[in-house]
Amino acid sequence: MAKFSQPEVKKFLNPKIITLIAAGIVLLILLGTSVYIVDQTEETVITRFGKFLNIKGPGLHIKLPFGIDRSYMVNVKAVQTEQFGFRTLKSGISSTYSGDTSESTMLTGDLNIVDVEWIIQYRVVDPKAWIFNVMEKSRTIRDVSRSAINMLVGDRAIMDIMGSERSAIEAEGLAFMNETFRNYGLGIDVIAVKLQNIDPPAGVQEAFDDVNKAIQDMNRLTNEGQQAYNEEIPRTRGEADQMVQIAQGYAAERVNRAHGDIARFNSVYDEYRRAPEVTRQRLYYEMIEEVFKDDKGTVILDRNFDNFLPLRNVGPGAVRGTQGGR
């Protein structure tokens, strides 16, 4: 061990050297307690004697030393996440999943039990409120989020929660949490609520799967029936409309024909009144012509016809005539 001579000891104990050393220590403490740097993702809340003074943004800043001014760094850019009903445990580069049924088990509106896992993501928007207004920040965030999701799940049936109402629960939960946190003055803004896994408890999973399969079959059969209905009903309606139009056309034709017959009868009657005998004779001829218009093998002779020998073809294949008179 080195020994110092008395002159050397006196040299080190020189008041000037002691004063310089003390001044250096004070300067280091002064610099260490008065200069601070704020990161680009942060804002710092400054207090003086414990009372809020101001908020500083990113950069190099100076404050009063020796604890007179204190700075509290708050990350206002990072999105923070809270997990509910499960935990992601990271070890090195891998992560494992761990369930937490104490948070996830809930009672639905139709008195079923369901396990709901979800996350919320939030960002600090008011550093002053974040630092001063609430002490148990994480506990408050988790309690409010659990209360919101339990309330929304308790208002709905289990099948709605697992299906169509999923997005509605997320949207209403987001609005409810933000309103509650604003009332508490927590200084955060929830930017996302995401439901993860929604499953019935393990003990009833098999029965629930059977029910879910039956509901899917019901929906499938309903859709098939609706499809058949959509195919058959328009076709049947078209055929019915076609039949109605045909009937209406037939009715119009019959009515028009009746009107025509009436007009013809009236015109014939007028002629008959002017010349009854001539009209009667013409009507008789028209009737005979109408009756025999399609008959090719009939010959009509007047029974009072004299001085005439009718000659007929009586050979093979001849058509036998019929004599008649009027």
Image (cartoon, helix red, strand yellow):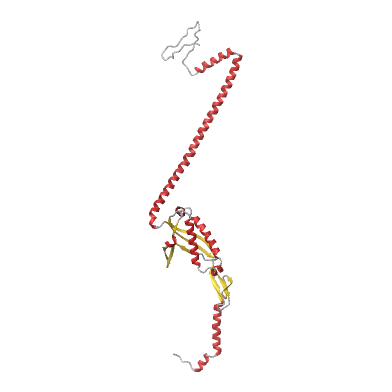
Vertical side of 248 occupied by 287: above or below:
above
Q: Is residue 70 visible?
A: yes
**What percent of the width, then of the height, locates residue 259?**
57, 24
> Which of 79/8 is in front?
79
Q: Residue at 55% across / 26% down in the picture?
A: 255
Q: Quadrant of the N terminus?
A: bottom left
Q: Residue at 53% across / 28% down in the picture?
A: 251
Vertical side of 317 occupied by 255: above or below:
below
Q: How many numbered badges does the structure rendering display? A: 0
> Which of 55/140 is in front?
140
Which picture quadrant has residue 61? bottom right
**What percent of the width, then of the height, locates residue 146?**
48, 61
Q: Is residue 194 visible?
A: no
Vertical side of 259 occupied by 322: above or below:
above
Q: Residue at 59% across / 17% down in the picture?
A: 269
Drawn side of residue 320 relative to residue 179, left or right: left
